[in-house]
Image (spheres, helix red, strand yellow):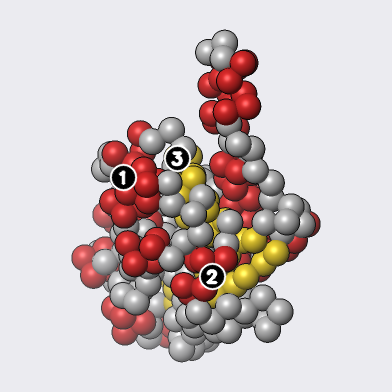
């Protein structure tokens, strides 16, 4: 009997998934129509769309595993209706994203960009014109206090920062909880976004929010691009309400060029903060492990549709 087929949707390194899938499935990195039709599992990159049309082409699909936690490009209702387990990998990239947040904050607060230009352009005498800030003693406002938000808090505390946290879905611990989002905005020297993208959080950072921000604050978004109104952020930078912006995520991706991208106090990365070398290996291994669990009739470690119920694989074969 041939092994079950697991396919890649997007660019997946076969080496990184080989171990967890060994003995349970044959992996196809570049599937054709016949591979998709036969597939019982899929490992799905963050930028791959899994809509009804995709699912129609994969009638035997039992599990899809997303590399990361965002499922906004997955038709969750349709997948759940079809009994498909949607695996996510929430732990593998948390530390890498948190390091990216602090890296962006350091770059912007310490003014590495303008200072590099001064030295490069022979403007040493103007170095006193650039005000260099500190993380120690500053306040970081974390919007969204899940796995990544908590890792950001731990790293920020190591720098001597005061932590405030706001989460619209689950209250953070009392020691850091800031139920009023406007109060967090007004009190924070660095603001970082880690809430999921929903109808309620789309363009959370808008003109109203930015009107409350402490003048000179730094904004970092390594969450979801749709959380931020780029026009409003550019105006806040020009007006001096924000002193710097770091973006790793965009809406759509890849992004359409925006005038904000040309501002000298903006730092841009192409949605890679959660994909360090170590985090990438862990993410793909966790995704493959989740697929193998479902195919073996086990409940995977993390599901985006927790109502999904495991099925005995022998029952599937008898149908």
Quick one: label 2, few (<14), some, or many (20+) residues within 10 Å? Answer: many
Q: Earlier in the sequence, mark 2 or mark 3?
A: 2
Q: Is residue 170 above or below residue 258?
A: below
Q: Nearer the viewer, residue 204 or 121?
A: 121
Residue 204 in the figure: left or right of residue 221: left
> In the image as oriented, which residue stretches furthest toward the top?
122
Bin the neighbour count of mark 1 within 10 Å (Cα to Cα): few under 14, some 14-19, many 20 and up: few
Which residue lies under the disc numbered 2?
Answer: 184
Element under disc 3: strand
Between marks 1 and 2, how big is the CA–CA gap? Answer: 29 Å
Mark 3–mark 1 distance (CA, rounded to whole Å): 15 Å
| Total number of numbered discs in the rendering | 3
Which residue is more in the foreground, 8 or 217?
Answer: 217
The quarter of the picture where the C terminus appears is bottom left
Q: Position of residue 276 (x, y in %)?
A: 61, 45
Q: Quadrant of residue 53?
A: bottom left
First along the sequence among labels 3 and 1: 1
Closest to the camera, between mark 1 and mark 2, is 2
Q: Which residue is mark 3?
A: 266
- Residue 158 image point, x, y percent: 78, 57
Pointer 1 residue: 255
Q: Does any portion of residue 233 appear in the rendered image? A: yes
């Amino acid at each position: 009997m041939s092994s079950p087929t697991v396919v890649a949707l997007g660019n997946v390194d076969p080496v990184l998934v080989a171990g967890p899938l060994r003995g349970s499935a044959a992996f196809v990195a570049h599937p054709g129509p016949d591979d998709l039709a036969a597939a019982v599992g899929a490992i799905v990159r963050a930028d791959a769309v899994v809509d009804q049309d995709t699912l129609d082409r994969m009638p035997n699909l039992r599990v899809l595993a997303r590399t990361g936690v965002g499922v906004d490009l997955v038709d969750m209702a349709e997948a759940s209706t079809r009994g498909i387990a949607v695996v996510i990998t929430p732990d593998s990239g948390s530390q890498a994203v948190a390091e990216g947040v602090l890296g962006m904050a350091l770059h912007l607060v310490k003014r590495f960009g303008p200072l590099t230009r001064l030295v490069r352009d022979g403007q040493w005498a103007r170095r006193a014109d650039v005000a260099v800030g500190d993380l120690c003693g500053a306040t970081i406002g974390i919007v969204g206090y899940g796995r990544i938000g908590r890792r950001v808090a731990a790293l920020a505390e190591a720098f001597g920062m005061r932590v405030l946290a706001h989460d619209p879905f689950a209250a953070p611990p009392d020691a850091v909880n800031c139920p009023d989002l406007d109060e967090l905005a007004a009190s924070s020297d660095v603001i970082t976004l880690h809430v999921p993208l929903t109808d309620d959080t789309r363009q959370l950072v808008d003109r109203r929010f930015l009107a409350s921000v402490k003048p000179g604050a730094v904004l970092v978004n390594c969450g979801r691009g749709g959380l931020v109104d780029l026009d409003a952020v550019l105006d806040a930078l020009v007006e001096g309400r924000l002193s710097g912006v770091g973006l790793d995520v965009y809406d759509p991706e890849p992004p359409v060029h925006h005038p904000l991208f040309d501002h000298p106090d903006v730092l841009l990365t192409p949605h890679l903060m959660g994909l360090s070398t170590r985090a990438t290996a862990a993410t793909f291994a966790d995704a493959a492990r989740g697929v193998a669990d479902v195919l073996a009739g086990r409940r995977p470690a993390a599901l985006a549709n927790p109502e999904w119920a495991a099925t005995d694989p022998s029952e599937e074969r008898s149908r």
